[in-house]
Image (cartoon, helix red, strand yellow):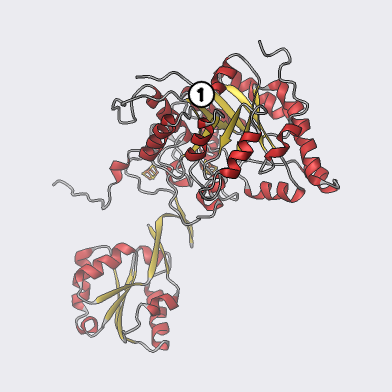
Amino acid sequence: MVSPMKSTLHDLLAVDRFVVTAEVSPPKGCDCGEFMEKARALRGTVDAINVTDNQGANMRISPLAPAALLAGEGIEPILQLTCRDRNRLALQSELLAAATFGVTNVLALTGDYITFGDHAGAKPVFDLDAVQLLQTIAALNSGRDLAGTTLHGAPCFFPGAAAAPEAEPFELTLTKLRKKAEAGTRFFQTQALFSPEKLVRFMEAVRPLGVKVIAGIILLKSAGMARYMNARIPGLTVPQELIAELEEAERPLEAGVAIARRLVTALSPHCDGIHIMAMGKEELIPEILADLHRNDGKEG
Amino acid sequence: MIVSKQKPFPEILASLENVSRVFLIGCAKCATVCKSGGEEQVWQMQEDLVAAGKEVTGSVVIDEACHMLRVQRDLRAKGEMVTAAEALIVLSCGAGVQSVSAGSNRMTVAALDTLFLGNIRRFGQFEQRCSLCGECRLNETAGICPVTVCPKGLLNGPCGGMSEGKCEVSPEAECAWYQIYVRLRDRGGLPLPQETIPPKDFSKLIKPGSLKLEK
Ligand code: SF4
Ligand code: SF4
């Protein structure tokens, strides 16, 4: 039995509607109350919510539980799933569990290395990589597991993957992006971007792959945070001029919102959607999106 | 070679709490090269133990402590020096320690931590290039091992943390996939392999490994 795809995200992207997604971190603990409040407040503002998976290798509740809660309330989740903490059995069973709870969108990730997080002595798994995880999702979608055995009830996932448009050398990352496309990714959510130039180059290279691109924008809350990110967050480089802008601002958070707002305007003409990483300040997302006019010509 | 380094001396002493007479065993191969269990280190260990109030009944540096029969033979040859000791302190890799513990009824104390199979870059500098995965992929990766050189062991290209060719895990190191990319480019202008490499077969690596040559 193959269930029909219940992904609103898929439906929106399929009709070239410009989408907005946002990331909300699940709690460290089992109380999802605050998480759900944040998510509910974004209803109508964003099309889907990414539920991060032990982000930065810091232990939190499995994203499956909050993603299932979202799906239960009719809020579209994107389940992030990394290869760092689970072997191929655990990944497949987690995916099947997600399907049972009505979670359809999955972002297949390799995962930040374990020593970045709060359990530095843990065993890193990396049984599969992100490309192989996408192949796994495709296999499950086709009704079989990685061992080739027929599933009793096949899922119908809408798979996505990460991309780092600013990473150099670009040719090297492009090889992997092609493999991800071949393995069935339908959308890319990018690492935080700070200028349209790299996105334009990225779009030129990725367009022929037929994969939708949702460009990442991060809310810089202060110069200190930007510096910390440059030092500690893999694959992310905040330009010096933005750090200076935050430094000189009387109210850095407001400056950060202004920067994010500018980026929405600069990036959105080039891609299929925007992904906001508000770093706990999800209540500021409507303000960041204030200049985005989503119906401009695109929606049918 | 097998790269090892000495445990902190207080830790070794702590394993000898109720022991006063010890016999020391070094290894003439790997542990000698990485200066963790050669003639010199055995001698130094003897000095330190004596200073700490232990009696050292004797010592031997075995030519390959991982060779089980040779270990038995060499310990037998040391006769009373060994039998008079309450504990045998072994300055070799974990394989050597276990040759000793299997070949003697004395308490065996491991004095080293065994780290990796290493290449010798230059004198005193060792690097891991191969992690003995049981299914060598070097023919597909320009002779650079992503299983080992990439901390995540990624088989299909760099992760999102690569930046300017550097690795997210240790920014002073080059990303394994950057190294592969550069080598292919510089040796014949080849692009990276486009085919997706399937997941590794970890059943090739069931522990404990064993191999019996057919005559
Ligand atoms: S692929 Fe790497 S780890 Fe495996 S045998 Fe070859 S060099 Fe060693
Ligand atoms: S940067 Fe390269 S070597 Fe480092 S973890 Fe990522 S893929 Fe592996």
Work out whether A229 lies above or below A51: below
Of residues B188 and B94, the one drawn nearer to the viewer in this rendering: B94
Of residues A77 and B195, the one drawn nearer to the viewer in this rendering: A77
Asked whether residue B44 is in view, the answer is yes
Q: Secondary structure at mark 1?
A: helix
Q: Residue at x 66, y 43 (%)?
A: A279
Residue A7: x %, y % from top left: 52, 22
Residue B147 falls in image quadrant? top left
Work out whether A270 lies above or below B95: above
Asked whether residue B139 is in view, the answer is no
Give the residue type at disc 1: Ala
The subunit carrying tag 1 is A
Q: Residue at x 34, y 30 (%)?
A: A146
Residue A85: x %, y % from top left: 45, 45
Of residues B199 and B26, the one drawn nearer to the viewer in this rendering: B199
The residue beneath circle 1 is: A181
On the rendered structure, is B198 left or right of B193? left
Residue A265: x %, y % from top left: 76, 26
The image quadrant where one finds the C terminus of chain A is top right
